Amino acid sequence: MAKVTIGWLYPGLMNIYGDRGNVICLQRRCEWRGLEVEVRSIGMGDLVGPETADVLFIGGGQDREQRLVAPDLREVKGPGLREAAEAGVAVLVVCGGYQLLGHEYRDADGTVLEGVGLLDLHTEPARPGERRIIGNVVAEAAFPGSEGRPRLVGFENHGGRTILGQGCQPLARVVRGGGNNGRDRWEGCVHRNVFGTYLHGSVLPKNAWLADLLIERGVRRRDPGFALEPLDDSLELTARDSAERRALSVRW
């Protein structure tokens, strides 16, 4: 029986808007298939590396929490996190975690947080007259391997504007919502098996196929033949469809 290990970085600090639901979703979708699964909490001062987990997760946090974890993420975990990504470990980072994996995050007060630099992106404050990006999102997945998948749905709430560089593939094209910056219609990014997104609410329970993709990619780095058995996702798809209809019914 395959064992799946999920590493949750900063569970006590980077965990807003229901982000713990992403870890629960990964865990349950393994358990429902009879797979052994372990969730490891990874806090301040703990190292990470290619053997830490099959899937690593960092949730969102407000500016205070981001300032607290940024030095640890960059200096303590950064080298090992980059090694893990190069080795094919699957990584999901949401909102604040997404911002801190880039080159830098500059908040509305002018404070600059140096990021890990794993993702070719930077985040800047809103321009004068731009409002906070908040609301439900519908987006068409746009990365290789997402062809034919249901649209991504979720909830965004962020003031920063994230700009992708040439080294990042957008995760999705926004149909309804603001996405990375409210300007170019892109949402999130993908680099190797690293997935960044602004979607809360939580993103994985609403988009079960993305959860399965993370699990499969993470385990396949050490077991190339690994494949998940299909589940009856009728309930998950009904919830996803409801979220999409609700989002599309509101003018953004």
Image (cartoon, rainbow, N blue to C red):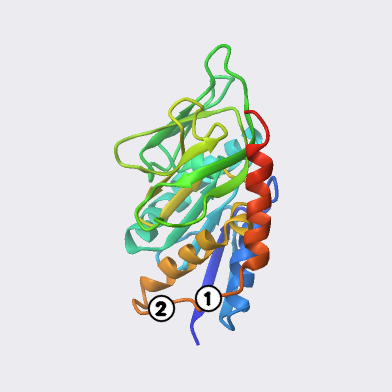
Q: Residue at x 58, y 52 (%)?
A: 44
Residue found at the very far top of the displayed protein: 128
Q: Residues within 10 Å of mark 1 (few under 14, many from 20)?
A: few
Q: What is the secondary structure assignment of the residue under circle 1? A: loop
Give 128 or 83, whichever is nearer the viewer.
128
38 to 72, vertically: above or below: below
Q: Which residue is mark 1?
A: 230
As drawn, is 122 to the left or to the right of 139? left
Give 81 or 188, whichever is nearer the viewer.
188
Report the quarter where the C terminus lies: top right
Q: Position of residue 207 (x, y in %)?
A: 57, 56
Q: Which residue is mark 2?
A: 226
As drawn, is 169 to the left or to the right of 31? left
Q: Position of residue 222 (x, y in %)?
A: 36, 75
Q: Residue at x 59, y 66 (%)?
A: 26
105 to 137, vertically: above or below: above
On the question of residue 14 being in view, the answer is no
Residue found at the very far bottom of the displayed protein: 1
